[in-house]
Image (cartoon, rainbow, N blue to C red):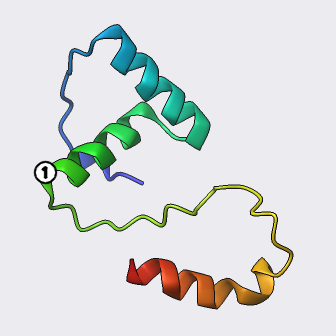
């Protein structure tokens, strides 16, 4: 979640193919284009104190023991 009083609006011009990839990724992950853009900029330029667990909202893993192992999984992901 973003605290809106601490952000600036920026316009970025993208080629059609990159815009399509960005929109597809936001839709696939169930998030906003702005969030994907912020993550990409933070990853490229560094900084940003927020740490995201990539597995969040990923859906079914196919494993039946996830609920039992959740603490172990979260610890492992946090160390990455």
Query: Is residue 30 visible in the rendered structure shown here?
Result: no
In the displayed structure image, the side of residue 11 where residue 64 appears, left or right: right
Q: Residue 5: x and y, percent?
A: 24, 47
In the displayed structure image, the side of residue 72 where residue 78 appears, left or right: left
Q: Residue 3: x and y, percent?
A: 32, 53
Q: Nearer the viewer, residue 41 or 4?
A: 41
Q: Residue 21: x and y, percent?
A: 44, 24
Q: Count neighbours of disc 1 (C-alpha within 10 A) and say few if under 14, some if 14 to 19, many if 20 or more.
A: few
Residue drawn at x 74%, y 63% is: 61
Report how many numbered discs are placed on residues in the image. 1
Pick out the residue farthest to the front.
62
Pick out the residue farthest to the top.
16
Using the image, determine if residue 73 lies above or below residue 3.
below
Residue 19: which quarter of the image? top left
SS of the residue under disc 1 = helix
Q: Residue 40: x and y, percent?
A: 29, 44
Using the image, determine if residue 2 lies above or below residue 68.
above
Query: Is residue 9 visible in the rendered structure shown here?
Result: yes
Residue drawn at x 39%, y 42% is: 35
In the displayed structure image, the side of residue 42 where residue 60 appears, left or right: right
Residue drawn at x 49%, y 77% is: 77
Residue drawn at x 42%, y 54% is: 1
The residue beneath circle 1 is: 45
Residue 58: which quarter of the image? bottom right
Residue 80: which quarter of the image? bottom left
Using the image, determine if residue 73 lies above or below residue 41.
below
């Amino acid at each position: 979640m973003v605290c809106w009083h601490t952000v600036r609006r920026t316009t970025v011009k993208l080629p059609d193919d990159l815009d399509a990839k960005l929109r597809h990724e936001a839709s696939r992950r169930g998030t906003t284009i702005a969030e994907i853009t912020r993550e990409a900029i933070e990853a490229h330029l560094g900084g940003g104190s927020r740490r995201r667990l990539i597995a969040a909202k990923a859906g079914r893993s196919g494993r039946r023991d996830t609920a039992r192992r959740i603490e172990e999984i979260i610890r492992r992901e946090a160390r990455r």
